[in-house]
Image: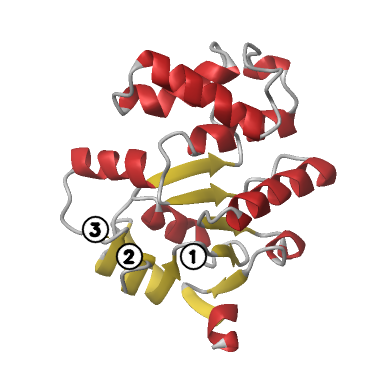
Amino acid sequence: MADDIISMDGIRKVYDTGKVKVEALKGVSFTVKKGEFVAIVGPSGSGKSTLMNLLGCLDTPTSGTYTLGGEAVAGLSRDALADVRNRRVGFVFQNFNLLPQISAQENVETPMLFGGVPPKVRRARAAELLSKVGLSDRLAHKPTELSGGQMQRVAVARALAMTPDMLLADEPTGNLDSTSGGDIMGLFTQLWNAGGTVLVITHDTSLARRAGRVIEMHDGRILKDSAREAA
């Protein structure tokens, strides 16, 4: 469908260690439409981290088809995959992945630097995004001068820098206290309400319930999908 941001059909991922083959995903199929807020949950070993890597084009499936923003991922070169990651996916990680030696504003500028955005434009956009996440007074602060919640807000601003098709967050509240974690999920809700597409991988079911849709993984398969239940 034209409004599908994500389309996965029969996705399998097998890791071959040489001695044994581990099937991490066993025929996963689902779609995500523009403007959905989806939480992907499951215990350790359920396949949700592998699924996150595939969704973010950090890895490729063993078999099955994956289309992101209307673009087939299979067969893309490493350079092409890197370009897709920069243009179409905004990443938010548990450990923030900020560059410690540069300011919050410069961290947000980083994807735009690689995307060839002119310096004046990227500085202005970085300042605008940091203001939107409540950090207009922290532009010049380095990550070591920020709290965990503030660092994750910088990471969210950075993820939005290239106006991606979707924001993909991997355990974004895992290193935060409950208050800061709730604030970050609230920020995702604001982005969703503004028309953004948000996918959150989390083990925290209480946070997942704040999403508009929950996909539950178990043993490499989708066990439940609230979108299907509502259909």
The picture places residue 222, in percent across and down from the top left corner, at 50, 77
| Residue of label 2 | 14
The picture places residue 195, in percent across and down from the top left corner, at 54, 56
Q: Which mark is residue 47?
A: 1
Q: Secondary structure at mark 1?
A: loop
Quadrant of the snapshot with the N terminus: bottom left
> Could you classify mark 3 by the number of other residues whose Cα lies within 10 Å: few (under 14), some (14-19), or many (20 or more)?
few
Q: Nearer the viewer, residue 97 or 191?
A: 191
Q: Which mark is residue 108?
A: none
Q: CA distance from mark 2 to mark 3?
A: 23 Å
> Could you classify mark 1 by the number of other residues whose Cα lies within 10 Å: few (under 14), some (14-19), or many (20 or more)?
many
Give the side of residue 16 with respect to residue 51, left or right: left
The picture places residue 83, in percent across and down from the top left corner, at 26, 39
Name the residue rendered at 75%, 26% in the picture: 147
Earlier-in-chain disc, 2 versus 1:
2
Give the side of residue 47 with respect to residue 139, left or right: left
Q: Which quadrant would residue 25 be assigned to in this image? A: bottom left
Q: Amino acid at mark 1?
A: Gly
The picture places residue 15, in percent across and down from the top left corner, at 34, 60
Q: Secondary structure at mark 3?
A: strand
Q: Nearer the viewer, residue 78 or 160?
A: 160
Q: CA distance from mark 2 to mark 1?
A: 11 Å
Q: Are marks 2 and 3 in contact (CB under 8 Å)?
A: no
Name the residue rendered at 37%, 56% in the picture: 54
